[in-house]
Amino acid sequence: MDMRVTRSGGACGSKGSDFWGVLRDERAQGTTEYAILVGVLVVIAIIAIVAFRDRVGELWDSISSAINSL
C-alpha cells in the first residue's frame, strides 16, 4: 500500500489528499462559495425573522385560525 505522510503528520493512502492539497484544489472553490452563500442567506433570514417577529407571529396566527376554521 502506498502511504505518505501529510503536513499534519497523519498518513494518507495514495487516493487520498492531504488538508493543504484540498485547500489548493480549485474544484473545491465552487463548493466553498456555495457554502458561504447559503450561510449568508441563513443569517439574513434569521435577522429578518427577529426584526419582524411580531408581524410574523400575527401572520402565523391568522394562517393557523384559517386552517382550523376549515
Image (spheres, rainbow, N blue to C red):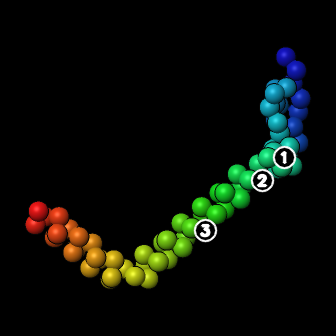
> Are the two marked residues, 2 and 1, in contact with CB atoms closer than 8 angstroms?
yes
Does residue 8 appear anywhere in the picture? no
Which quarter of the image is occupied by the C terminus?
bottom left
Q: Which mark is residue 2?
A: none
Q: Quadrant of the N terminus?
A: top right
Q: Nearer the viewer, residue 50 or 9?
A: 50
Pointer 2 and pointer 3: residues touching (CB < 8 Å)?
A: no
**Callout 1: 10 Å neighbours few (<14), some, many (20+)?**
few
Q: Residue at x 83, y 49 (%)?
A: 26
Q: Amino acid at mark 2?
A: Gln
Residue 5, located in which quarter of the rendered image? Answer: top right
SS type, badge 3:
helix
Q: Is residue 56 left or right of residue 9?
A: left
Determine which residue is flagged by label 3. 40
Q: Marks 3 and 1, how far apart in space?
A: 23 Å
Count up the numbered dots. Answer: 3
Position of residue 59 relative to residue 38, above or below, is below
Task: Report x, y in % for residue 44.
Answer: 54, 73
Say which residue label 1 marks.
Answer: 25
Q: In the image, is residue 28 above or below residue 43?
A: above
Q: Residue at x 66, y 62 (%)?
A: 36
- Tell me where residue 12 appears, x and y as whole percent: 81, 30
Give the farthest residue toward the front.
Answer: 70
Front position in the image: 8 or 23: 23
When the figure is inspected, residue 43 is found, relative to residue 5, above or below; the finding is below
What secondary structure is found at the residue carrying circle 2? helix
Location of residue 10 in the rendering, given as x and y in whole percent from the top left corner: 81, 35
Residue 51 on image: x %, y %: 44, 83
The residue at which mark 2 appears reads as: 29
Question: Who comes first in sequence, dot 2 or dot 3?
Answer: 2
